[in-house]
Amino acid sequence: MKALGLLRRSFEHGVHPAHHKGQTADLPIQRVPFGSHYVMPLGQHTGVPAKAVVATGERVDRGQLIAEPGGFVSTALHSPVTGVVTDVGNHRDVDGRFAPAIAIEADAFATQAVDPKNAVDWQSLSLDEFISAVQMAGIVGLGGAAFPAHVKLSVPDGVRIRHLLINGAECEPYLTTDHRLMLERPEALLEGAEIMRQKLGAEETVIGVEMNKPDAIGVLRKHIQRGQPVRVVPLKVKYPQGAEKMMIKSVFGKEVPAGQLPRDVGVNVNNVGTIVAIADYFLRGMPLIERVVTVAGPGVTYPANLVVPLGTPVRDVVKFCGGLKPGSREIIMGGPMMGRPVASLDVPILKGCSGILVFTEKETARRREYPCISCGRCLEACPYFLNPSRLARLSRSRMFDEMKELNVFDCVECGSCTFACPSNIPIVQLIRTAKDDLMHRREPDA
Amino acid sequence: MNSLLVAPAIMVGIGLFFGTVLAIAQRFLRVDEDPRIEATNELLPGTNCGACGQPGCLPFAEKLVAGDVDPGQCTVSTDEAIEQIAEYLEVDAGRAEKLVARIRCNGGRLQANQVAEYRGFEGCRAAAVVSGGGKGCSWGCLGLGDCERACTFDAIHMNSNGLPQVDMEKCRACPDCVAACPRDLMELVPLNQNLYVQCNIPLAGEAATQLCKVACDACGKCVADAAPGLITMRDNLPVVDYGSGAEARPEAIFRCATNSIVWLEGEQFQDQESRRAGVG
């Protein structure tokens, strides 16, 4: 019976990449010293970019509001340092493009402390007030997508959230930020979870953790008080266990239909980092101005788990970790499966950045591509049951409209298909190209 | 022997029956199609490129016969073919203005600063989704030839500098390259509009020139040197307004330090230095 229960703790399909977490899993979270220049892009979350409320030359304090939400699916931005705004204009964003951003020069003599009396009494807030407080705190999903957290909280009438699911799977190789947070700040995680659970009116909190983190599971279980409606569920080690729909399938055995959201099956999913950010804001008054980042990979001299103020250039973070080893070729922001390479060391660390990974020539050399042999491994890998090989072939022939009929927009670009492909076909890259074409296509002026 | 004949006899019987039915149907249910549509379609190039705005050549032929469009709207046909169609249908040719594809960027391998190396698979759009390719400028040509592959008429070839060279003879001004470019740099420009801005950077001054040697730094000299009202600055880029009525003269480009506004009389990127000297 128990074996059956364990078998159920997973989803179908998926892949098993080597996890490479040993480099940083045992390193406590350290704080990066404050640097001098910070850049806060206004569009660093999913949705509408924020609107700047400060002007060039203005003095800002750490934690002060510098941009307000530009709409409902948008959040506020706060200054990561005490200093002076040097520019409100175009700066290089992580995607290589120039985007509107606020540049701040840190005051070298400021204490950089956050005023603790800003703490918010969450119990007295109504649900609507709570949602707008989360929005004004600038809290987004810290797992990587940077989707504004308050949007997930706003549940339409008639939908009831039964379970609060906290995502501690961290299925991406190399990354250990959530792992370290669960080990070092279990109280904050449980406090934040309690705030969220009470405000959502959920019956219980479930923390899903992959079984390769037994220490985190132990620490969390030890901190749960008797009678507290919190459950820690160990999950099978499999990629992408941390994709929210996969995790719901693993934990509750329910499938979220395509085009629907977790709330439609009564679940609210949040990353460990997001929950800790909630606790930090409501109990300690600190809005989202810093996050934990794993710096790892074969090209880093001293790998580390770091608390980095948002807007810190990647250059400063890498420098703190002893710089790049000779032969470093590629820097990836995020995990190796879903992260994206950065084109410049001047790009800032953003809310959605969970890792800085540096790879050398050995790992990044493009392997020779062979024709598709129709082996079907990508189909067996795809957790969303799409047909990646067919999508890739259509994308090659620029038949993007046909791809829409094959549900290309259900693809979350998890990279399982490319990982599984024995012919080294860049399937995800082809799918991303097609999605980009479909979304940004300019109709020719006839 | 007898049984051997039964099967062919049945088949012949069925054949005769359906033959008769079809013959009757042909006689009573026939839809008369204008024979001119077929004839006009024969005269069209048959490339189904869509440059005329119709889904293909046959629908265009139908519209032609109905008199909804002019033969000249087919930009692919030669002048003689259009004359022939016009004569056959006894309509006015209505020759459209000759357009040619131009690219709003002059920052090839030698001019644009490189900040990273892109090693993914070949394709501009693929590079654009990975941190915007390797060039420092995030508005310019990626140089990986999406337009070259999209061109139906083999009119675009990437030159040694990594920029698309448009063969003016072969370019039929269909919108394929315009749709293919992820940076929206290709545009169809009338051949007689000689003043052309070949830069897309919305930054001014050093911010622009440190990204690319031939970037427009928004100095505004072309605006001052052209006839009043012809060129205006919009988003740190000069915009040539041919509708303003002011005469466009090559003097406007003489003081451009970065070659981002040019006087084109033929192909783009063709020995521009000597042309500048020539018109001066």
Image: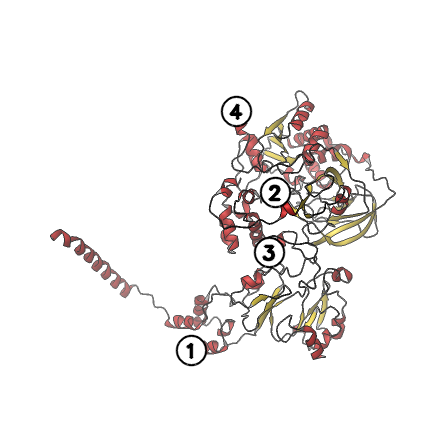
Pointer 2 residue: A337
Q: Are marks 1 and 2 in contact (CB under 8 Å)?
A: no
Question: Label 4 is placed on what type of residue?
Answer: Ala
Q: Are marks 3 and 2 on the same chain?
A: no
State which chain disc 4 sits on.
A
* Foreground of the two, A290 or B89: A290
Q: Examine the image and state in which quarter residue B117 appears.
A: bottom right
**What number of labels is visible?**
4
State which chain disc 1 sits on.
B
The circle drawn on residue A3 is: 4
Residue at x 64%, y 46% (from the top left corner): A362
The label nearer to you, 3 versus 2, is 2
The circle drawn on residue B88 is: 1
The circle drawn on residue B125 is: 3
As drawn, is B264 to the left or to the right of A53? left
Residue at x 81%, y 34% (from the top left corner): A116
State which chain disc 2 sits on.
A
Question: Label 1 is placed on what type of residue?
Answer: Tyr
Sooner in the amino-acid sequence: mark 1 or mark 3: 1
The label nearer to you, 1 versus 4, is 4
Q: CA distance from mark 3 to mark 2?
A: 20 Å
As drawn, is B203 to the left or to the right of A11? right
Q: Position of residue B209 (x, y in %)?
A: 75, 62
Question: Label 2 is placed on what type of residue?
Answer: Met
* Foreground of the two, A13 or B162: B162
Question: Label 3 is placed on what type of residue?
Answer: Arg
Q: Is residue A106 something that shows in the picture?
A: yes
